[in-house]
Image: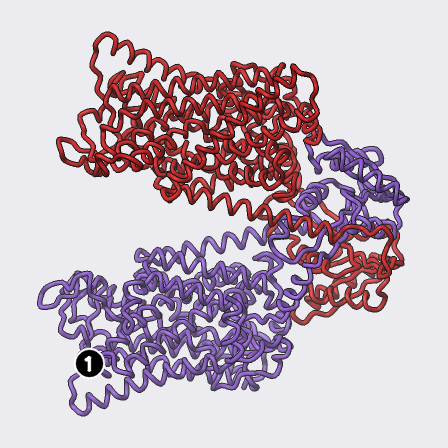
Chain colours: A red, B purple
Amino acid sequence: MSKLTDLPKRILIGRALRSDKLGETLLPKRLALPVFASDPLSSVAYAPGEVLLVLSIAGVSAYHFSPWIAVAVVVLMFTVVASYRQNVHAYPSGGGDYEVATTNLGPRAGLTVASALLVDYVLTVAVSVASGIENLGSAVPFFVTHKVLGAIGMIVLLMLMNLRGVRESGTIFAIPTYAFVFGVFCMIAWGVLKIATGHDMHAPTAGFTIHAESSGIGGFALIFLLLRAFSSGCAALTGVEAISNGVPAFRKPKSKNAATTLAAMGLLAVTMFCGIIALAINTKVRMAENPATDLLDHGRPVGSGFTQDPVIAQVAEAVFGHNSIPFVFLAAVTALVLFLAANTAYNGFPVLGSILAQDRYLPRQLHTRGDRLAFSNGIVLLAGFACVLVYIYGADSTRLIQLYIVGVFVSFTLSQTGMVRHWNRLLRIETDPAKRRHMVRSRAINSFGAFLTGLVLVIVLLTKFTHGAWVAVLGMCVFYATMTAIRRHYTRVSDEIAAEEEPGDDYVRPSRVHSIVLVSKLHKPTLRALSYAKLVRSDTLEALSVNVDPDDTRALQADWQRRGIDVPLKVLDSPYREITRPIIDYVKGLRRNSPRDVVAVYIPEYVVGRWYEHLLHNQSALRLKGRLLFTPGVMVTSVPYQLESSELARVRARRRADWNAPGSIRRGPVHHHQPREKAREH
Amino acid sequence: MSKLTDLPKRILIGRALRSDKLGETLLPKRLALPVFASDPLSSVAYAPGEVLLVLSIAGVSAYHFSPWIAVAVVVLMFTVVASYRQNVHAYPSGGGDYEVATTNLGPRAGLTVASALLVDYVLTVAVSVASGIENLGSAVPFFVTHKVLGAIGMIVLLMLMNLRGVRESGTIFAIPTYAFVFGVFCMIAWGVLKIATGHDMHAPTAGFTIHAESSGIGGFALIFLLLRAFSSGCAALTGVEAISNGVPAFRKPKSKNAATTLAAMGLLAVTMFCGIIALAINTKVRMAENPATDLLDHGRPVGSGFTQDPVIAQVAEAVFGHNSIPFVFLAAVTALVLFLAANTAYNGFPVLGSILAQDRYLPRQLHTRGDRLAFSNGIVLLAGFACVLVYIYGADSTRLIQLYIVGVFVSFTLSQTGMVRHWNRLLRIETDPAKRRHMVRSRAINSFGAFLTGLVLVIVLLTKFTHGAWVAVLGMCVFYATMTAIRRHYTRVSDEIAAEEEPGDDYVRPSRVHSIVLVSKLHKPTLRALSYAKLVRSDTLEALSVNVDPDDTRALQADWQRRGIDVPLKVLDSPYREITRPIIDYVKGLRRNSPRDVVAVYIPEYVVGRWYEHLLHNQSALRLKGRLLFTPGVMVTSVPYQLESSELARVRARRRADWNAPGSIRRGPVHHHQPREKAREH
């Protein structure tokens, strides 16, 4: 795998650089936009379709509500963008929603946001990949018949790419994102031109009618349906918060540039969203939740053989013609930008994990920035969860979207509420009237943002809970409970091992060291262990061997004498050819006889280079070590002997050190990253 | 799981004893027979059916050859039993075929036998369990429709039981085995009585005719078919060699008792085999390879809904009546004894593994007698292979039997050939005419055994290779190649680390020790590591910390000063919050400056009791240790700190120590086990 991907990567992006050489590669706005916006922009590929799909429950006549829903989404988008522009100015260190919530609303709110974001990353991968495969399917029918396979294959491919550690450049994001934006705008422009010149365009589903599940509904039921359609449309907002995590990656003035980029992203997203909905209505796109039964061709259901293409593909077909070059181009870049959106989750998941690890909500070793192992674990976990979801929901983006958005709006709401608190706190101490005015304005924006996103959260929960949102809520609860348990564990251990100010009465200062070198044969590793053990001066020193085979033991004793080794050799008997038990018993006996002594056990250890060699060496030593450590007053020293093959592993380790965590371009250079305590003082 | 199985186990067999308390529980013949014979006796449950099945290819008329095939199997059985009686006398230490072949024919022959036996163990599990489920299915139709599920469930159940380590008693084997023998003999006696009194018995398939695939064949084709039928009948011989491994488990005179038991087993097996075939012919049992198409009911194929029950079940139905109490009883004990036969493979596989490990063909750590970990690995591997086979072949015992027997006859042939060499060698030095006469007789028996089993091996390979035996041969080759590679690896490493007689020119005796204690916080584990490191007197001692978070580092430094610790504290910088790299770089720097010094790194390590706690602690330390060991001139000391939860693990370890390897009853008490070198001198 690694060799295969190596060459194209080298050609594309040159040799991977360590991230500390990345110091100067800050992002200009024109590159920052595609780097951060692939997620929110790509969601216009599925959000308009979801709106139509929900409306179709009440029949085609309900489609005339779609402009109003589009307006609601636009208002919401502007509100969220305006709110996050405040975040970007207030937290230029790139503190995301987790930090804003933790700082201003306390650790529980922070942990809730974190759980929501973790669930959201999983769903971003699942939804984006599923939708990408569906868009690909509009041009390549193979992906229609092999939807699940294609989606899981893509998730695994992204996983492998991220495990390998592809060094990113802004250009890699820029090309597909701008191509996608360009394609959609061309489609809209061409469509408008055709309409203006009196052309009549027909989507492939234009001739169908819809069997309304509940036609002629009104009153509360209709309102509920409209709210549900609006909830689905809100999928267009996912990923907006990404820029607020990435402020340090911008060129100076960072906050201002980030805010501008945010505004540009919002404007692009709503334009494309509205354009696609308008064209869909004009070209008479028909979407149904269950196309096989509810889409009617001359009054008869189209049946399960029919593929309902995504709305963007249907519009493109109406505008450009089926399988025309621009149609295929748009399908390709749509799929590409959706996969890119999935990729951002691969970058974000482990980074959030490392922040949570710093706060002890996740295993401590994950906190290293861009640590490869932590990164790998996070990526594999993310891919695994996403695959399970894709498999369960048959890679159907419509069913997956029911789970989506809950997490997004939980974190929107808590983050905006936190910002209100933030301004309140600052207003208590600020006296400069100009600054106060500014803060009051920001507070008003964030308050409205908190109110509106909170309202949407309630709507999403009400309209989608039974349709699948409960899965997302359950996932959040599981993450929350796990992280709380881990944090509690760390706190308990920390209390247990806290040093007393004065050593207690039960503390016995150790007095002497009795050293033992474990010996099986007299070869180089043993001789090295003996010479090191002699160098470290202990009170007594002996060599210890277990008599597993009497002939071997006799040979060892003879060799020992012949070489005149000045360390006494003790041999333990072992009728069952066991090694661990006799040694443990012997060490325990030593400890019993002189409880104040410390026993130092030296174990020669082979250092090998290939994974399978680990199975062939050191296993007995490892097990023995594991058992010895349970005995108080014992320390265990590994004296390594590097076999020739260990050179391989050293080379591998060096290569690993050159590894570059994916997503570093979004996080900015390291010397701009400040400890969070300081960031809070801003 | 463990708790659930605990109570019935305790009730049945009392508290598990350690195997060293097993010294006096030697087996009397009446218990040794069932302990060793469940495998060969149980094979009469499927071998007769396989003979009929192959004959049916030439049509029902070919069934009249079945008595001749039975005679051939009987002759072969007596030959093999007579041959192994010589083995038992010559190798009273319980050296199995592997040892006989290695000692007399060299390591390659030994390794071939070992590969054959390993494959055979896997197939014993697959065939016995599949056949057991089929027999169960004759009384409980559920197991017909859920054959694969039932078989895999059974394999997993046996695996869990063996992992848990059930202490065996002869009685556990005796009851089902004797019940099975009793049941079959009752059936034969009752059947003969009914025939004698003029009753007409009809098997459920008696009314069917068979569509012969190649009817009216003659000449070479017929001979080939008869040979193939004979090959299938040879399945009755599997497991005969088991007693030759278990001589030490017998009461004195061991060899004589083992030889008598072997003879009794052979006699029982052939009587049951012939009785079942005779009754099958008399009750007109019809078996076809593809019953759905080749069994004809009034000229029409019975179709895939028809279940062809095993021959023993059909005969029982004819003799006792369908679903009568004796019929169900026989089905139950047949299934039970087949599962018991599968269980013997679970005992044998890890034991053979431990013998191979002693000869360095398998990872070294497996050589401990009854070692739990080695045992577990072997058992899981065996169950895994068996599950794969059962899944691939749809738990169809007929298809699985095509793979069987190759391994058995490879080891029969090589073992008997080895015995001929053995007698030749002894005859060269023996002068006593009485003893010589005895040896010449033994040699004649073994020569005939080698010839006949070799002939059967050729027949089996010729007639079954394309029917599936190639899979078994391939499996043997894979085992052979793997074990050769492991042995070569150990030899190469052993050469690499062999100590020179005189230290070479490149050898620099280390001169001083520089000790480093790794510190993250000043808690009890750190304080213990510091006090131990001070106790072991080295030339220089310093504490080392990595500055991951400036606030934490400042707190550590303040604490250090306040407590007045008399060890200098050095702090390394780490912009990426890495821990491993700065420490490795520092240690490498030390080594560069004074290459003759040894660096001793002390790492405080948490000892925990729950598996998930391992994920939460020590991961950074472990990784650091792994990297440090690659650097020559470094040794790494773990200073354990036992957290409260470690008590759990200690209790678990104690319980594990009381664990008793399944199969110990077959191997006999340990003080009778002699090193193999001595056994060879007998």
Q: Is residue A528 visible?
A: no
Q: Residue furthest top?
A: A197
Q: Quadrant of the C terminus of chain A?
A: top right
Residue B75 location in percent, x, y?
34, 77
Image position of B106 with respect to A117: above or below? below
Task: Identify the residue shown where x is 28% and y is 30%.
Answer: A141
Is residue A252 placed above or below A15 in the rendered structure?
above
Task: Tell me the amino acid under the disc marked 1.
Answer: Asn
Residue B278 percent coordinates (x, y) = 24, 80
Residue placed most toward the observer, A124 or A638? A124
- Within the image, what quadrant is residue B183 found in? bottom left
Q: Secondary structure at mark 1?
A: helix
Q: Please identify the residue farthest to the left as the structure is shown.
A: B298
Counting from the top left corner in percent of width and height, residue B219 is at 19, 64
> Looking at the image, can residue A627 be seen?
yes
Name the residue carrying label 1.
Answer: B282
